[in-house]
Image (cartoon, helix red, strand yellow):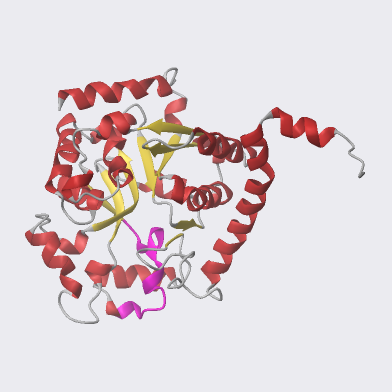
Amino acid sequence: MGRWFESSRAHQHVFIGITEQKMNTVPVVVSFNKKYTIPALITILSVIRSSASPGRLEFFALHNGLDRYIVLLCEKLVASWGGIITFVDCRDDIEGVYNPNAGHHSSETFNTLLIPSIFSRYLRTLYLDVDLLVRDDVLTMVDELADDRKVGAVRCMYRNYTKYGDDYHGFRAYAHDVLKVRNPYDYFNSGVVVFNNRNITTEDRHRCVDLIQKRWEHHDEGILNHVFQDHLHLFPAKWNMDVFFMDENALHFTPPVSSDLLKADGEFSIVHFLGRYKPWLSSGPSVENRYMKEYGALWRDVKAAVEKMAAETLCGSMWRQMNRVDWQEA
C-alpha cells in the first residue's frame, strides 16, 4: 500500500505553484479510454457552455495510457473552447490493485478512487462520467456541498424505484447485504460526485484503493458508497437524472426522489445516459427526445471541431504549410 501512495506523488508536478487564489479553482475530472474520447469531449463542452464562471473550472482527464495524439487533440480542442485540460496517467497508481484476470471491469472505472489523493491540494473536486449532458452551472452544485461532508452525490434512481415492489432487481438488497450500506435508499450514483478533499482522511484514501480487490459489482460506485455513507451530502435528483426514468411517474419513487422530481418539473441540470441507454446506441432515447436534440447539437459542434483540428494534430506544421500553397490543377 505504501508503494501506491509513493507512486501517486509522481503526479504532484501537475499541481506545483498552486496559490491561495488557485484554491478557488474547481477541478472537473473525467476518466476515459480512446473509445470514449468523443463522448468525453461532448460532456466537457456541455460543462463549459453551461458555466457562468468558466475561469473557475480546470479539467483533468485520468487515463491509463492514452495515445499521445488523442491527448494533444483534446488539449487543443478544449483550449479552443476557452478551457484547459491536463492529462494524468494513472497506470502506476492502479498497478498491483487492479487485476484484469480477476473479473475486474476496465481499469479506467477505478480511477475515480484516486481523486482524493491526486487532488488533495484543492478544496473540492468534481468528478463526471462521460455519458452526461450538463445543462446548468456545475459550480452551483459544488458550492452547495455542506462543509462537514466528505462527498456529495445524487441518490440512485434504481434503488429508489418502487413501481415493481420493494426491491427492484435486488439492487437494494445487494447494497445492504454485500456492500454493507446501512440505508440503501441513500445509495448514490457515482456518475456525478463532489469530493470535499479537506475532510477525506488518509484512511479513507487507503480503503478506497484496498477495496478494489473485493471485486464488488458497480466497480468504483460500490466502494465509494461503502466508504463515505456516513459523510454524504445528497444533492437533488436534477443534478444526475437518469434518462431511462425521465418519463416515469414521479410517484413511482421513494418520497425524497419523488419530491425532487416534482420540483424539477422536467427541467434537469445534468442528464445521465446510463447503461444501454446511450445516445450512440440503437437502444438509446429517441432523437425526438429534447435532451437527445441538445446532445446532438453538441455532437455536431464537436464533430466539426475534430474534423478541423485532427489532421493538423496528426500531421503537424506540414499540414498548415501545404494548405498555404495555391495549388493549381494539372
Camera-side residue of 207 and 255: 207
255 inside magenta stretch: no
Rendered location of residue 183, percent (x, y): 13, 60
The magenta stretch is 235-251
Residue 230 visible in image: no
> What residue lies at 45% left-to-right and 71% top-to-bottom?
284
Farthest residue in the front direction? 330
Camera-side residue of 36 and 77: 36
Camera-side residue of 330 and 205: 330
Rendered location of residue 99, percent (x, y): 20, 42
Quarter of image, res 80: top right
**Placement of the N terminus among the 4 image quadrants:** top left
| Direction from residue 183 to residue 35 in the image, left or right | right
Q: Is residue 94 above or below residue 223?
A: above
> What residue lies at 34% left-to-right and 45% top-to-bottom?
194
**Placement of the C terminus among the 4 image quadrants:** top right
Quarter of image, res 84: top right
Q: Is residue 285 above or below residue 221?
A: below
Number of numbered callouts drawn: 0
